[in-house]
Image (spheres, rainbow, N blue to C red):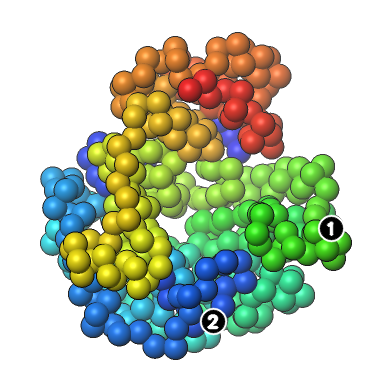
């Protein structure tokens, strides 16, 4: 990751984003501890009515600024009926209007059932697909709990690349027993597919997951942190050489192919969340929808929206969130902008002594009001952020 000036993107002040959460899966998620969303069938008409009502509520509070991105995520959004996707996109355009280069992303599992629907989904306005490939090794896919194999995943990738303007896929590395040579070969193969965006994550052991249980039982040994650091550096070198460098700690893109939707999150712009469990940030408010589908649906029927809570974020909260999100980016953060947005004076935002020490170690850089974590610092980001952020 190089220290770069901000890359072109719609101005945060002029646009906003929309996240639409479709909660349903057709099979149990290997990572999810909440599986009441597994359904054999869904009352599409009822869900269409509820999602449109939830969206209309958000629109009533956020008019006057067009959408620069829409992201369909959640359970298995690529199994949404294409007609429903089209209706939601049309409603969003009617409510807010679109920037000329709007990005409309669909999250999809790379299996033959979902890939067969890509053609219909491509006619709805979707122009970007994010595929959860996760590995290019069948044994690894089995370990990760994925239902697809490599051949099926690559067939879905080929279909997506033929039908959509922009395609991204993700891979997980630093898996148990994965050598440097193993990851080098897998990443080289991934880069050869020529997508404009890659999300490359190190395997992390989160409390309450199946992996945490396996570690506790002694049935899984996580990758050594030093080995993980070696793989991270290898990743940065290979993606940079291929012209798809990191612009965020785990995300890599060709120039102009960065995820505009995720940039809204990382740059702390406004986004509306619609659907069960969806989070949002709008006008200094943190919004949260009811997570359980039935509870969300009941709230929409009673109140005209699926909100569980709305919380006013005080200046310290907004500044802290903006710093923690923005310092993940290679471009870093504009401290003057955060001060203006939060009402917190710039001197209170960060620890000047820590900046001086970390700058001397080559881990951060301060240029005027722009603070960036250096490539070497990204390896230590979790330790660096508490030192930098003063609020």
| Residue 198 in sight in this render | yes
Asked if residue 175 is positioned above or below residue 310 in the image, the reply reads below
- Residue found at x 59% / y 30%: 385
> Which part of the image, by quadrant, shows the N terminus?
top right
Q: Residues within 10 Å of mark 2 (few under 14, many from 20)?
A: some
Residue 137: image quadrant is bottom right
- Residue found at x 75% / y 55%: 174
Q: Is mark 1 on a helix, strand or loop?
A: loop
| Residue 72 in sight in this render | no
Number of marks present in the image shown: 2
Residue 221: numbered disc:
1
Residue 322: image quadrant is top left
The residue indicated by pointer 2 is 27
Please state which of residues 197 and 286 is positioned toward the viewer in this rendering: 286
Residue 95: percent from the left, percent from the top? 14, 58
Q: How crowded is mark 1: few (under 14 residues within 10 Å), some or many (20 or more)?
A: some
Horizontal arrangement in the rendering, residue 29 relative to residue 23 (left or right): right
Residue 310: percent from the left, percent from the top? 30, 46
Q: Is mark 2 on a helix, strand or loop?
A: loop
Please state which of residues 131 and 195 is positioned toward the viewer in this rendering: 131
């Amino acid at each position: 990751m190089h220290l770069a000036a901000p890359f072109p993107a719609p101005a945060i002040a002029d646009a906003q984003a929309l996240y639409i959460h479709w909660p349903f899966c057709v099979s149990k998620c290997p990572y999810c501890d909440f599986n009441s969303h597994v359904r054999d069938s869904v009352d599409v008409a009822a869900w269409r009515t509820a999602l449109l009502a939830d969206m209309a509520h958000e629109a009533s509070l956020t008019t006057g600024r067009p959408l620069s991105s829409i992201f369909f995520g959640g359970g298995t959004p690529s199994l949404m009926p294409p007609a429903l996707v089209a209706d939601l996109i049309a409603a969003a355009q009617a409510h807010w209007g679109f920037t000329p280069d709007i990005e409309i992303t669909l999250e999809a599992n790379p299996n033959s059932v979902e890939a067969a629907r890509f053609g219909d989904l491509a006619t709805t306005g979707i122009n970007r697909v994010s595929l959860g490939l996760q590995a290019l090794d069948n044994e690894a896919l089995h370990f990760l709990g994925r239902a697809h194999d490599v051949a099926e995943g690559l067939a879905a990738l080929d279909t997506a690349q033929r039908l959509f303007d922009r395609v991204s896929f993700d891979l997980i590395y630093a898996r148990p027993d994965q050598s440097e040579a193993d990851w080098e070969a897998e990443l080289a193969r991934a880069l050869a597919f020529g997508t404009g965006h890659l999300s490359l994550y190190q395997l992390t052991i989160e409390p309450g997951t199946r992996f945490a249980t396996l570690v506790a039982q002694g049935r899984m040994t996580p990758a050594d942190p030093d080995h993980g650091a070696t793989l991270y550096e290898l990743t940065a070198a290979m993606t940079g050489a291929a012209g798809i460098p990191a612009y965020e700690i785990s995300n890599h893109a060709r120039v102009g192919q960065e995820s505009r939707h995720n940039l809204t999150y990382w740059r702390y712009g406004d986004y509306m969340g619609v659907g069960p469990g969806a989070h949002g940030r709008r006008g200094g408010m943190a919004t949260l929808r009811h997570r359980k589908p039935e509870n969300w649906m009941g709230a929409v029927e009673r109140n005209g929206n699926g909100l569980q809570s709305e919380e006013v974020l005080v200046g310290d909260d907004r500044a802290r969130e903006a710093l923690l999100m923005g310092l993940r980016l290679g471009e870093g953060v504009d401290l003057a902008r955060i001060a203006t947005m939060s009402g917190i004076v710039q001197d209170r935002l960060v620890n000047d002594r820590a900046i001086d020490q970390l700058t001397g170690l080559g881990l951060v850089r301060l240029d005027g009001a722009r603070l960036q974590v250096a490539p070497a610092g990204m390896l230590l980001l979790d330790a660096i952020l508490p030192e930098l952020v003063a609020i």
